[in-house]
Image: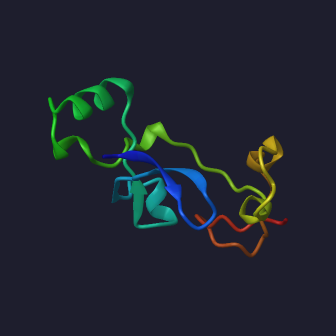
Amino acid sequence: MLWSEWRDRVNDETLATCTMIITRANSVVGAIHDRMPVLLDYEGMKAWLSGELGTEILRPAPDDALRMWPVSRRVNKPGNGEDPSLIEPIAVHAEAEPGTLFGLN
């Protein structure tokens, strides 16, 4: 099962949980980490969930499927919610190494 809902007995709250399938990083993500989630397009998702395709489809996304830019460190703070400004590009420190995500904020 890839997702489920269950009742937390401690606080009597219904929780929705899911599984993330992880693979090696492509060259874009590899600049900052050695792993990444598997990203399937709609057709790939249907083929995998139906059993038509197996684990051979669980591979890194094509490099041109992703974009990367530095964002504010505010993305790491709880409580920022749905603030769309969190994904706006920011300038990076002059001393930051290429391929890092260390910004000014």
Q: Is residue 3 left or right of residue 78?
A: left
Q: Is residue 59 left or right of residue 35?
A: left
Query: Which residue appears at 34% of the width and 49% of the height?
Result: 60
Q: Is residue 103 above or below residue 55?
A: below
Q: Position of residue 51 (x, y in %)?
A: 16, 33
Query: Which residue appears at 76% of the width and 63% of the height?
Result: 78
Q: Position of residue 73 (x, y in %)?
A: 76, 64
Query: Which residue appears at 52% of the width and 66% of the height?
Result: 32
Q: How is the image coloured?
A: rainbow
Query: Which residue appears at 70% of the width and 72% of the height?
Result: 96
User: Between 14 and 59, which is closer to the camera in this rendering?
Assistant: 14
Q: Is residue 6 above or below residue 104?
A: above
Q: Position of residue 91 (x, y in %)?
A: 80, 57
Q: Quadrant of residue 42?
A: top left
Q: Position of residue 88 (x, y in %)?
A: 78, 45
Q: Is residue 66 above or below residue 104?
A: above
In this view, which residue lies farthest toward the bottom?
Answer: 95
Quadrant containing the C terminus is: bottom right
Q: Quadrant of residue 12?
A: bottom right
User: Between 4 and 101, which is closer to the camera in this rendering?
Assistant: 4
How many marks can you see? Answer: 0
